[in-house]
Amino acid sequence: MNISGKAAIVGIGETDYFRGAKQSVPELVLSASMEAIHDAGLQPTDIDAVIPPPGYLSTEEIAANLGIPEVTYAVEVRMGGASPTASLQSAVMALSAGIATNVLITFGWNGYSAFRRRPDGAPNRRKGDPGPFIDVSRNFYAPYGVRSAVQWYSMYIQRYVNLYDISPEDAAQVALTCREHAHLNEKALMGGRPMTMDDYLASPFITEPMRKLDCCLETDCATAVVLTTTERAKDLPHDPVLWLGGAEGHPYPADEITNRPDMLKLGLDSAAPRAFSMAGVSPLDMDFLQIYDCFTYVVLMELEAIGICEKGGAGEFVRDGNIRLGGRYPLNTHGGLLSQGHCWGFNHVVEATRQLRHDAGAAQVDDCELGVVTGYGDLGDGSIAVLGRA
Amino acid sequence: MSDEPPKQYKKYVPQPDGLNLELHKRGVETGLLHIQRCVECGQSRQPPRYYCQDCFSDSYEFVPVSGAGSIYSFAINHFTTDRAWIEELPYITAVVELAEGPRVVGALRNVEPGDVTLGDAVTVSVEPRGEDFAFIWVDLNP
C-alpha cells in the first residue's frame, strides 16, 4: 500500500515558550491541542485517535479532558525527540488504513520547570519517559558521570569532528542562523537577543566540543497538530499540507552508542532514503529544512544523513548563508530548539506547516512547495517527514 | 547556618540485574575486566546480550580480557549535573576499543584535556565498587 500523500496536516496549535511557565504540563498540552483542533475547523468529538507525549500525559487523559468520547486508535511513540515526526507516520498509517478519521498528535513538557522551578511557578511534577535505553545508560554511562544528552552525544560527536575536521565556526553557523531566524518569530524565546560569532566562541564548553551556545533551550511549552485524510482535508479551512513520505530509523543497537559498527551512523541515515523514495523527490528539491537541533553538531550530522551533502560536507554546506532565509536552503525558520524553544521538534512540524500554508509571516520562504522535517532523539533515533503543498 | 555536617555525595553505583549483574560479578570477583563471548562462534560482545548477534546462539561465557585497547572516542566534561563528579571537572570519559573487539566506556584518569587523541593506546582495568559493580578505569600507556 502506498501511503504517500494520503493524509495531510490540517490543524496546528502552539503555546508560548516559557522558561518557567505558570501553567501545568496538562494545561499546556490541552490548550495547544484545542487550538489545533479548532484551527482544523473541527471539534474534539471529531477526533478519534490521539498520540500523546510519552510519560507526561496519556491518550486517555487527553481524551477525557478535551471531550473526545470515542478513541479508535491510541499509540505512544518512544523515540525521545524523534517521536513527534515519527508520530506523523503512525497517524498517516492509521488514516490511510481507515482506522482513524482525524488524528491529534501533541507534545509538551516542563523541560525548564522540571529542573529549575521558579518561586512563582506552579508545581510542575510531571516527569517524562526515562527512555528505552535506561538499562544501558544507568549501568554503563551514569557511573562515569555521563548522565545527560550533551554527554551521551559527545561520545560520537568528538569522533565526528576529529574524523571530518568540523570546526567550531561551522557549528556556529547553525546557532547563528537559528538566532537570526528567531528574531522574526514573536514566539521565540531568544528573539531580540542578538548572537555574534564572538559570543559563540566565548561561550563556555559544556562537554567538548559542545559549548553552551551549541545547546538548545530548556523550555516549558506544548504543540499539537491534527491530521486527516487528504480527501477530507479539502473541506477544511486551511490549505492542506500533504505528508508525502516519511520514515523512522533506529541505529543498531539503538540502546547503546559505543558498540555500533559505525558509531557515526544515525537512525536518520537509514530513514531518510526511505522517506525521499516514498515521496518521489530528492533532498536537493527541498525549499526549506526544519532540522532537529538539540545541538548544533547534531544538525550537521543530520544534514549529511538526509543526503543533502556528502559525509563530512555539512561544514561547507552551512557556510556563506546557504541555510539562512534568502539562501538556497533556509534552516529552522522559526528559530529551532536552539533559539525558539524546545518542544521536542514538534515546533518544527508546526513551522513547516505554516511555511507550506504560506502563512509564515516575516520568515516566509517565498513560493515554497516542498520541505523536510527531521526528528532526532534518545541515543540517535531518527525520523523524517517530507511535506508539500497540495 | 545549620550545624549539620556537609552532605556526602558519593558517585553513583548501579544495581545491575540479569546479564549485567553476571558481567560485573565476574569483574568484582577476579579484579579483571571481563567481556561476554559466544560459546558457539566465539564472537565477543558488550554490553552483554541474551543472544549472539552473529549466530543467534544463547550460549555465552564471560572471559577476562587483556585490558589493551585504544581510544575510539571520548567526551571532555566541563559541566555536570552529577554533584558527585563536580570536583573532578573537567573529567574525560573514554570510549575504548579493546584488542578483543568490543568497546567499553570508562573514566580516563591522570590526563589533561588536549592530551588525548583518537587512537591513543590505553590500558583498561576495573575496581570493585560494592559487590555488584566493577568500575572501569582507563589509563594512557606511557
Image: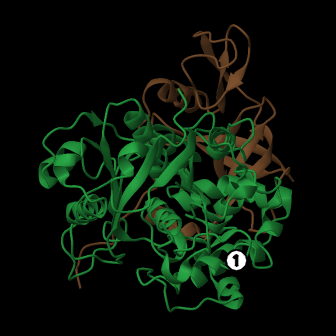
- Count of numbered labels shown in the rendering: 1
Q: Which residue is mark 1?
A: A172
Does A168 appear above or below B23? below
Residue B33: x and y in percent read 66, 33
**Where does residue A86 sit, x and y in percent of width and height?**
48, 45
For image coordinates 20% across by 65% down, the residue present is A27
- Could one spot residue B13 in this view of the protein? no
Quadrant housing residue B17: top left
B142 sits to left or right of B64: right
Taking A365 as reference, is B127 above or below it?
above
Callout 1, which amino acid? Ala
Question: What element does badge 1 sit on?
Answer: helix
Which chain is mark 1 on? A
Residue B129 vertical placement versus A158 (above, below): above
- For the point 57% across and 37% down, the residue is A254
* Quadrant hosting residue A285: bottom right
Q: Which chain, by letter, is green?
A: A
Frontmost residue, A268 versus B105: A268
Q: Position of A306 compared to A188: left or right?
A: right
Q: Residue at x 33, y 37 (%)?
A: A75
Residue A306 in percent (x, y) is at: 70, 51
Q: Position of residue B93 (x, y in %)?
A: 65, 55
Q: Is residue A327 visible?
A: yes
Q: Nearer the viewer, residue A176 or A103?
A: A103
Q: Which residue lies most toward the front here?
A: A235
Chain B image colour: brown
Visual colour scheme: by chain
- The local crowd at label 1, few if under 14, some if 14 to 19, many if 20 or more residues have their Cα within 10 Å, is many
